[in-house]
Image (tube, helix red, strand yellow):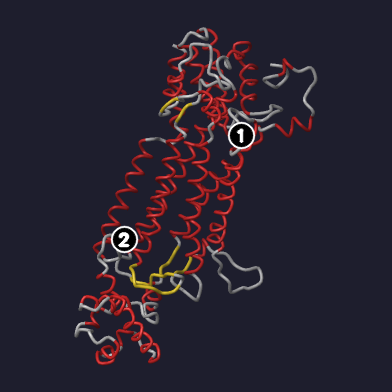
Amino acid sequence: MAGDVLWGGRFESPLHPVIREFTGSLPFDRRLAWHDLLASLAHARMLRETGILSTEDSDLILSGLSEILSEVETGRLEVAGPDEDVHSWIERTLVERVGEAGKRLHTARSRNDQTGIALRLYVRERLEDILAGVAGLQRALTGQAAEYRETFLPGYTHLQRGQPVSLAHHLLAHVASLRADAERLRAAHRAAGESPLGAGALAGSSFPIDPARCAALLGLDRTFANSMHAVADRDYALDAAYACAMLLVHLSRWADEIVLWCTREFGFIGLDDAVAQGSSIMPQKKNPEAAEILRGKSARAIGNVTALLALVKGLPLTFNSDFQEDKERLFDSLDTADWSLAAAIAIARAVEYRTDVMEAALSGGMLTATELADHLVRRGVPFRTAHHQVGEAVRMAEEAGLELWDLDLETLRSCCPSAGDDVHEALRPDAAVAAHDSPGGPAPRRVLEQLETAEREVGALEAWLDGRPTAPIRQAHLQERLLEEGLE
């Protein structure tokens, strides 16, 4: 190692200062220090077990790495300096502490597979954090759904009142979106569970390494099948960024509803002062700015996916320094998703549902017109004919300033001759909701099924997260085990 770079022996003159700064990545990849150190511990342990490193050298390396890891974790050691990247910083710091033995750590390893393993460990840890946030928001919404099973309001298509539904059914629709997000995030977590350690620069190693041992020590699911693919692969990063983007899109749709529903035009909800903000010029304003910003966050997540796709689309095998650009985009997506979920949970818990306004909105939109058509169909009228007849009844009710259920039977039959004596019973909003008893529908029985399923799924996600302690805890246990085994 010449100076503070890992490759200086080939070069006679120092790197141009502008190029040095332009190509350096330590300012942003230093957040991978913990994960890189952990992977280095696993690599050193494997080198010891296979006899590639002597007991004396591996003892020094393992103890030195552990000391650095502990100091980074507690904040006693800052990851900073003239180094071009976090890998160089770790090796320089190790050599300063343990001497010549530290230079042996990089045996049978390249910065290519080193970068891959650190980033994969980081992604898995952050995805678990995000999944915990997803579960938290699902808990908030399912709790509200359980409370408002008997509250009815208009369901909308084209932002026009369509048919009556329950508030519980509406909230559970957002929970279903989050369920899909959780599935994507877990799939990305699985994709990141492949260890590239042992792939080297691209062609593996001539030493008798044991990549499976490194993967096992790091708690990863599997090791690579092809060394060239292992160092060239960034699919897991794209999967994570896409899963975050979809999550942010769903949060954006929910946030847009918060913005819309708290307007005076809707008035379906009120927001606690803790999650609303005012105007610098209009004293009366109470703005849902947090929800608006949450809605806007999806744009950057979408942009990050586009940037990552463009980054990898034309790269030849195997490793290219273009990959340096993947981290800031990926880090931003993970950070944005995590932070946005925290904001969404705070907003969700601060919503006051104005059930009286919701129920008042059931009038004025002819929301049970479809129920009248279905009533006629049950009495033998073809649906298209029934649709036409009900359209005439709607026009008549609008001209009279009435709801369909306010029209007397004689007037209804002037448009809908087959209407039965019990037609008005079918036209009540609560009856209409109860009648929609098809699977996944808004009928109370079906909503209860959806609620029970949602609670069961959230519980399963929480159990999975409990079974997989957050990465820092896992890594602390691994650090201790590596030391016990490595220094015995």
| Gap in angstroms between the C-alphas marked 1 and 2 | 51 Å
Q: Could you say which is closer to the camera, residue 474 or residue 202? A: 202
Q: Are marks 1 and 2 in contact (CB under 8 Å)?
A: no
Question: Which element type, helix, strand or loop, lies under badge 2?
Answer: helix
Does residue 454 sit above or below 326 in this rendering?
A: below
Q: Which residue is mark 2?
A: 146
Residue 380, percent across and down? 21, 78
Q: Quarter of the image containing the N terminus?
A: top right
Q: Earlier in the sequence, mark 1 or mark 2?
A: 2
Q: Residues within 10 Å of mark 1 (few under 14, many from 20)?
A: some
Res 315 quadrant in image: top right
Q: Is residue 386 left or right of residue 84?
A: left
Mark 2 belongs to which amino acid?
Ala
Q: Which mark is residue 315?
A: 1
Residue 383 location, quadrant: bottom left
Give x and y (percent) for residue 265. Answer: 49, 76
Give left or right: position of 59 versus 80.
left
From the viewer's perspective, tell me whether residue 406 is left or right of residue 285. Answer: left
| Residue 329 x/y as whole percent | 60, 42
Residue displayed at 58% across by 72% down: 285
Q: Secondary structure at mark 1?
A: loop
Q: Is 75 above or below relative to 309? A: above
- Compare residues 66 and 174 and report the one nearer the observer: 174
Q: Residue at x 44, y 32 (%)?
A: 193
